[in-house]
Each structure stands twice: as structure tokens, then as C-alpha cells.
Image (cartoon, rainbow, N blue to C red):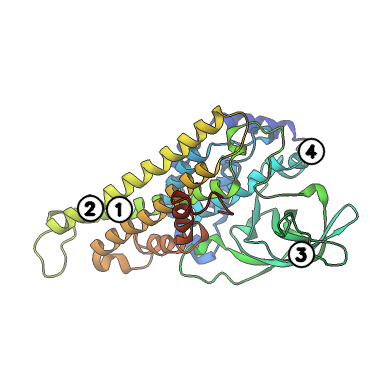
Amino acid sequence: MRPTPAERSAAGKQKTADPLELANRLAPVIEAGAAESEARRELTPAIFDALLEAGFYRLLLPRSVGGYELTPSRFSEVLERIAMADGSTAWCLGQAGGCAMAAGHLPPQIAQEIFAPRRTVLAWGAGPSGQALSVEGGYEVSGTWMFASGGRQADWLGAHVPLCEPDGTPRRAEGGKPLVRTMLFPAHEAQFSDVWHVVGLRATGSDNYSVNHLFVPGERSFVLDGEADPSQTGVLYRFPITLVYAGGFAGVALGLARGMFDALIELAKNKVPHKQTKTLRDNSFIQVQVALAEAKLGSARIYLLRTLEEVQAEVQASDGRGLSAGQRMRIRLATTYGIHQAKEAADIAYRAAGSTAIFEHDRFERRFRDLHAVTQQIQARHTQLELVGQYLLGVTTEPGNY
């Protein structure tokens, strides 16, 4: 399906806009509605519509389909700014951004069919799970998937599914590893389960969803982190989707921590703790802690962005190859480190704010919970650092599935 003239015009305008400037404009609206989003356990209609209008669900969509096609480093910066206003909003955009990269792995006509409409949002959950039976023309898919961030507001869903022969026998690659494809289907064909009752990132609405014996045409499936369609020549589509996620979610963590840190700086001007005579700003211990937190945030941010930018430049200068094992490890280290440094800086701000930080809907409490939810996700696991250590020590030369 070809885009309408109005959609082509909107896409052209979108590509000239600066997403970081748009993020700065939208941040006050997002922050003002964050408490309502959390209570709804999904983004408010006003925030969702504002994000759609600005094209924020198309940050990693190919330009050929009207997307921004940001580089991984720029994507991380945009999510960082949004997370300063609200972590759940940034997380939903980070997840949707990685999902939108599916367009670069699909046949161009299928990518147009799904993503050309301006309001298209694709979401998917963790996997692989379920099974996809090979049938004429495609696959018969059944299963349940978790953590579909933004899924209830999506038009399309994806599912990472192990392939099976018609008799149910698993398909395996050389070495015995299961073959997995990502299936795309309209969201109304799935059944959601209301399970997202959590400590942090509540407004992401990351519920479970299921399908049973659903037919998915073969052309609406692809291999996650497989080779991109040859028509996609930009540097973005030489990156594995999982590593783009890592850079984006590290940006979310840094933005949440920066939001807490900025709130502490403002609080410290006037707060005099109980039974003390000086403001927080005049407390020598707080002064040291603020300096340490700033160093943690600043150094982690520079390390993250510089690593992404260096790898982008190296990949751009190469002869079309994807990332090497060494480049993957550099990104994995910078992103995992950035998430944990953000947590440490946020913990400093939380402790320094005292009892102010424990009240609901203050500038600390929700960000604190959201950031600690981020650190529980796969991108922050210490096994990521273990893999990097193994690589640096020569124990393994393979990047694995990380």
C-alpha cells in the first residue's frame, strides 16, 4: 500500500525536523502527564497523540518509509531527554524504535504496507516462545509472550517464535540451535492479559499477549538481527537491533538519573533538614556527593555516546560488513556500564534528598522506581559484563546473543 500524498508530505517535513529539539518541546507535556500515565498503566491519549504527531514512533524507521532513521548515538540522546521527563514514555519509545527497525528487514512492499500509515506503532515482547508450524504460504503461530511495552496502544504486534515442521519437529540450524523468526500481525488478532502490576515503569503497560493457531504470511516474518534488506544502505541497519536497544535503554537510565540529579540541585537551594541549621547546598557531605554523582553521569554519558559514535564511523567506513565481535563487546560494555552508573548517581540523589524523596508524585520517587526497574531488565544484567570480560581475556571470541 502506497502512502497518500498527505503522508508523503508529512514524512518529508518530519525528516527535516530535529528530534532532540522536538523532545525538548514535548518534555513539559510528558512530565505534566506522567502521573496520569502511571495511574492508567499506559501513556495518556494526549501524550500518545503528541508523540505520534512528532513522529517519535518512527525514530528508527527507514527514511524510505518516512522515518527519521537516526543513528544509534542520536537515538540514545533523544531517549535520554525524554526520560528526564518520564521514564515510561522513553522506554515505550525505545522499545517501539527497535521494533520499527523490522521495516529494514522486510521486503520493501511489506514494509510500506505496515509502516507507511503515519500512526503505525509496532510492539513486541520477549522471546523466543511458542511455536510456528510451517504451512503453505507462511506459518501457523501459537504462544504467549511477555513484556509488550506499549502493546495495548500498538496497531501491530510481533512475536519471536521457534520454527517447527508441520509435524511439530523443531527446525534447527547447524550445530543444533533452534531456528527463530519474528512474526508480525495486526494487534487485534492477539489476546492481552492484564499482568503489568509492577514497581516501576508502570506506564509502559508491558502486558502479556497470546495467539492461537494464527496464520502469518511468510513475507511478514524475518530473522531478528539477521541481514537487513539490501535496499537499506544506512549505517543504522548494519547494527543488530539488540545493540540499538542497549544504547537506547542506557540513554533512558541516564535521563532518569539526570532528572533526579537536577531535582536534587533545585531542592538543595532551600531545604533545611530537620534539626539542622544549614541548607543541603551548604552541607559539605552533600557537596561531595553531588560532585561524585555528576562525575558518574558525565563520564558514563561521554563513554556511551563516544563508543556508539566511534563504532558508527568504523562501520560506515567498512565495506558493508556488520559489526565485529569486538565492536559488539565495546557497545555492550558501554551500555551496561552506563545503566549501572546511572543507578549509582540516582541513589546518591535519592539519599541526599532525605524524606522528600519518598513521597508519591514528587520529582524523585517515580524516577527512582523506574530506574531500578530498568536495572532489572536484560540490558543491565551482569552477565553482559561477564561476556565482555570473557572476550577481553580471550576465553571466547564469539559475541553470543548479547
Neighbours of disc 1 within 10 Å: few (<14), some (14-19), many (20+): many
Q: Would you name the residue on which mark 1 appears?
A: 261
State how far apart marks 3 and 2 are (Cα): 51 Å
Secondary structure beneath dot 4 equals helix
Q: Nearer the viewer, mark 1 or mark 3?
A: 3
| Quadrant in the picture for the N terminus | top right
Q: Is residue 298 left or right of residue 193?
A: left
Name the residue type under label 2.
Val
Q: Nearer the viewer, mark 3 or mark 4?
A: 3
Q: Are marks 4 and 2 in contact (CB under 8 Å)?
A: no
Q: Would you name the residue on which mark 2 appears?
A: 290
State how far apart marks 4 and 1 are (Cα): 46 Å
Secondary structure beneath dot 2 equals helix
Q: Is residue 60 left or right of residue 215?
A: left
State how far apart marks 3 and 4 are (Cα): 26 Å
Q: Residue at x 24, y 56 (%)?
A: 267
Position of residue 315 relative to residue 76, above or below, is above
- Camera-side residue of 218 and 147: 218
Determine the residue located farthest toward the front in the rendered image: 394
Secondary structure beneath dot 1 equals helix
Q: Residue at x 58, y 37 (%)?
A: 236
Q: Are marks 2 and 1 in contact (CB under 8 Å)?
A: yes
State how far apart marks 2 and 1 are (Cα): 8 Å
Q: Quadrant of residue 192?
A: bottom right
